[in-house]
Structure formats: C-alpha cells, structure tokens
Image (cartoon, rainbow, N blue to C red):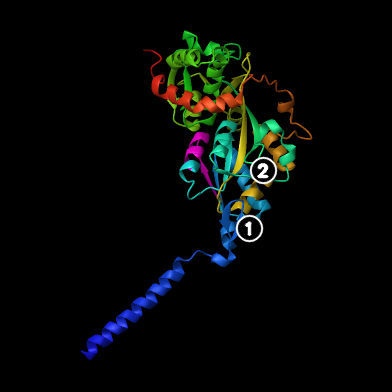
Amino acid sequence: MFRRRFWLGLLTAVAVAMAGCGGQDAAPQGGSDSQTQAGGGQSGGQEEERLVIYTARDKSVVDFVVPKFEEAHPEYKGKVEVLTMGAQEILERVRAEKANPQADVWWGGTQQALSQAAKEGLLAAVKPSFADQVPAEYKDPNGYWYGEILLPEVIMYNTEALSPEEAPQDWDDLVDPKWKGKIIIRAVPASGTMRTIYAAMIYRFYEQDGKPDRGFEWLKKLDANTKEYAANPTDLYLKLARQEGLISLWNLQDILIQKEQKNMPFGFVMPKSGAPILVDGVAVVQGAKHPKAAEKFLEFLFSQELRTELATQYYQIPTIPLAEEPEWLKGLELRPMKLDWDVMAANEKDWIQYWDQNIKGKGSE
C-alpha cells in the first residue's frame, strides 16, 4: 500500500512539473507585458522584426523592392514574407482572415477592391509622411489606403504576328469576327486588372442606359472571340509569346516589363476612345501583427528615390509627380476613359459574377 501511494504521488508531481514546462513553452515570445498596440494590431519584441505582405504586383517589381527595403531596414533582412496573388484574391483572403489577420500590408490593389475593404473594416487608417502629397482622387479620404501608381489598361498584342497598324485600335475592334480564336484573356474574377477592364466595358453602356444589358451583350461577343482564359499572368505571357493567341487586354506596366526586361514580343495600343486608368494602391491591414513594420514599408515605398527608380526601370506612373520623369513617361500619351469609379465599385461584384455565371464560355452559343 505504501509503495502504491509513493508511486502515485511521484507520478502526480512529475505530471504537474511537465504541465508547467509545457505552459511556458507555449507562451508567445516577449510575453504579454512587452506587447504594444499600434495601428490596430498587437506587436512586441521580436514580433516586429517580421513583415507579411500580400501583393498583386509583378514578381520582378517585388524582387527589386523587397531587398532594397531589407537593405534600408536591416532588422527585417530575411524576415519579409511575400505572398503573390490576384488583387481580388487578396480581398477575399483578407476578408476570410478578419478575425485573425495574417497579412500586415496589402500591396497592389485596385481602388475598387481597397475601397470595399475599407468599408468592411479590413484596413487600418494610417497617416504616413507622404499622405498630403497624394492627390485626393488617388487615396482614401480617411487614410485607409493610398494610391501608389496609375495603371492604364490597354490592348496588348504579339509584335511578331501583328504590326502596330494591324492590331486592334479600339475596344470595339476586339469583337470583330476576324479576331475569333485569336484572343487570350487572363481569368477575370481573380484579376483586379481584368475586373476593371470588364467593368469599364459595361459602364460605357450603363452610363447611357442606366442598366448593364448592352454591356453584357458586348462581353458575350468578346467571349465568342476568346480562345482561352489563362489561369494567371505567367500563363498569359507564355501563350501570347507562343502565338497561341495574338491579342489580349492588360495593364501597360506589365506589358512594358515583359517587353523590355524579358524580351517578350509584346506591344500595346492605347485605345482611341480612351483607357481605364486604374489606381493601384497599398494599405495596412486592420489588426496587423506587425503594424510598425508595415508603416515603415509604406514610407519606403513612397520615397522619392525608390519612386524614381521604379518609374525608370519598371515603367511605373507614380501618383506623386517626380522631380524628373524618365523619357518613356515624358513621351507617353495617356487617353483616360471617362468613368465613374464609385458606380463601378458599387456594381463590379454583381457584374463580374453575372459574366462568370452567364456569359463566360457561352459567347458562341
């Protein structure tokens, strides 16, 4: 009896000791006393030495900017995590993670998606040093997001198959039956660029009629000419370069990056009737775990030196004017399409959903 009680007592003591050790190992680094509140998120100690970015920006731009940020802020060297996805996919992911945010920065989002995120309480209001330099039309009035660059949406074509004169010169040229089977388009719902272009095509008729019907009819004709919807930008570039299709619709910056830096046979046409000029922005996620790191990244992104480098080497059109523009930008003739962005933002979700369910793949029926 004595031995049994002795061993029971010993086992109980060991179990209690082990439970105590387990509890210490499970505690967050830095402890609750060292955590601080900033920008709607909790951070402290080593936690702020990380930065998580969700981005829709071109990989070459990301690979250029992140190492420079780490060089300017050595405390984050090797500790910046970047997840690349479509702008719409970022909105959906940030929305799904609202109760437990995983991202600190949303870098590369349409003004429609960012505005929607702000309405849903997904973004943190911040006022960085450059806030007053960004024109009012390119930022949220309450500081939830800031437009970084302007992205003209244009007609893209394979220069080895078509001359500039042979390529479609305006949006309505795309629905000419002669282009049937020669158009490849990036999958629309996940892409901020494509959602903007398609919403703009619908809005042209919505402005006149007060309803989207004729816009849907136009997109049905475009679908009839579309050979394929590429799963992602990389697939789009490869298929167009291999002449599986000759024409696409895309943003000017990425076209120029592919052409000038990767020797892809791509050219562009600025549509005669005007191009949707998208505001591509950046925001801090509400509840970000590393808000100080996030704000440092925003400050770095809008620095004069980096904006000049990105305009020169990566064909960005910054929302804050440069002291000296690169030659390519000086010679660029922008033709903005007249659009009501608030109306587009309010209707985009329903319009794209209708297209996806009722038009995609059915244009030839």
Compared with 216, 310 (above or below) is: below
Q: Residue at x 57, y 53 (%)?
A: 41
Which residue is most to the top?
177
Looking at the rendered structure, which numbered label has been put on residue 301? 2
Q: Quadrant of residue 145?
A: top right
Label 1 element class: helix
Quadrant showing the C terminus: top left
Q: Amino acid at mark 2?
A: Leu
Per the rendered image, the range of residues in magenta is 81-93
Q: Amino acid at mark 1?
A: Glu
Secondary structure beneath label 2: helix
- Identified at 56% across, 47% down, the residue is 286
Instruction: Point out which mark residue 276 bears.
Output: none
Rendered image quadrant of residue 74: bottom right
Q: Is residue 84 magenta?
A: yes
Q: Is residue 70 visible?
A: yes
Question: Residue 355: image x %, image y %?
Answer: 44, 22
Say if residue 317 shows up in the picture. Answer: no
Q: Tell me, yes or no, whether the two marked residues, 2 and 1, touch with CB atoms within 8 Å.
A: no
Toward the left, the furthest residue is 1
Q: Decide which of 68, 122 is in the foreground and name it.
A: 122
Residue beneath disc 1: 75
- Tell me which corner region of the image, top left, top right, bottom left or bottom right, holds residue 166: top right
Q: Residues within 10 Å of mark 2 (few under 14, many from 20)?
A: many
Q: Residue at x 51, y 38 (%)?
A: 91
